[in-house]
Amino acid sequence: KGKRAFIAGVADDNGYGWAIAKSLAAAGAEILVGTWVPALNIFETSLRRGKFDESRVLPDGSLMEITKVYPLDAVFDKLDDVPEDIKSNKRYAGSKNWTVKEVAESVRQDFGSIDILVHSLANGPEVSKPLLETSRNGYLAALSASRGSSLSLTYIASERIIPGYGGGMSSAKAALESDTRVLAFEAGRKNKIRVNTISAGPLRSRAAKAIGFIDTMIEYSIANAPLQKELSADEVGNTAAFLASPLASAITGAVLYVDNGLNAMGVGV
Ligand code: NAD
């Protein structure tokens, strides 16, 4: 029987989440996605109107099917945690059951269980501010959106200085990588669940464009990485499919670089 995957953080066809969904679908998985509430409407409309059809094509020529799109806001666990201004916000008021616990319960009711959980989302409200100037709220928001799952996406700014990746996002990724190890132990012992994170190279996603320096990072990587090519989202998607498969049955607690090898360089060339 095919596996069922839930990918949190898909709202268009440009990011890593979409590419991961495609690779998992190509490998035979059933796809459920969690889409940020304010982005839900446009994503569902675009899907329905066929705007993503070209990007839905799988290697065998068929189109990726998304069985269900769940509204999700990953920074709230339950309705009680949601502040009034968000509850009454027009874009949120139109959907329901989008806190983490409610989505988990909806998925359980709809499908019983899932086999693969992917966290492919980030939100650093102050990402364009240096850490030195980041407010407590901005910092905590970045941390809060970054909590891990069985597979997540991280960035090398967690361990090396990447000027411009601000707002506490570097700290959020450091916490995510540490949590990946500890959760691998706890979930491995308790439920035999594997927990890993992919440290991805730069991709021109919507989130990355908002940071403001993505083109520079892509050029830097092409100039300096061992493999001189632009990273495609599919390369990360395929790694995710591998990590989620039995081929990776002994891999857990790992930070796996998918970055054309840039992490291995000591100096630029
Ligand atoms: P993306 O814009 O495709 O994905 C980010 C998603 O997060 C968006 O769909 C957005 O709607 C969603 N989101 C934001 N806040 C949310 C919330 N509170 N609840 C639910 N969803 C929320 O961008 P991406 O670059 O593909 O990002 C995916 C992951 O990859 C992130 O963890 C990011 O940090 C990581 N990453 C990206 C790069 C890069 O260069 N693009 C490099 C390394 C790691």
Image (tube, rainbow, N blue to C red):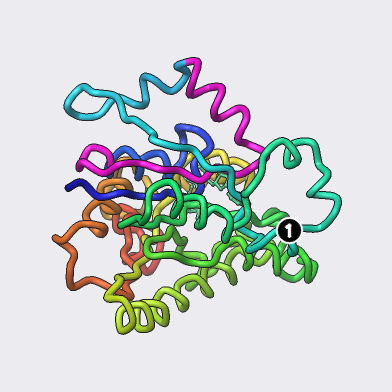
Give amino acid for label 1. Answer: Lys
Q: Position of residue 25 (x, y in %)?
A: 27, 39
Per the rendered image, the range of residues in magenta is: 25-49
Horizontal side of residue 153 vs 78, given as left or right: left
Horizontal side of residue 92 vs 113, given as left or right: right
| Front in this rendered view, residue 107 or 167 | 107
Q: Which residue is mark 1?
A: 129
Residue in the picture at 54% in, 68% down? 161
Horizontal side of residue 260 vs 82, given as left or right: left
Q: Is residue 29 magenta?
A: yes
Quadrant assignment, res 77: bottom right
| Front in this rendered view, residue 160 or 54 | 54
Q: Residues within 10 Å of mark 1 (few under 14, many from 20)?
A: some
Residue in the picture at 63% in, 55% down? 99
Residue in the picture at 41% in, 43% down? 32
Q: Position of residue 156 (x, y in %)?
A: 45, 64
Quadrant assignment, res 83: bottom right
| Front in this rendered view, residue 2 or 11 | 2
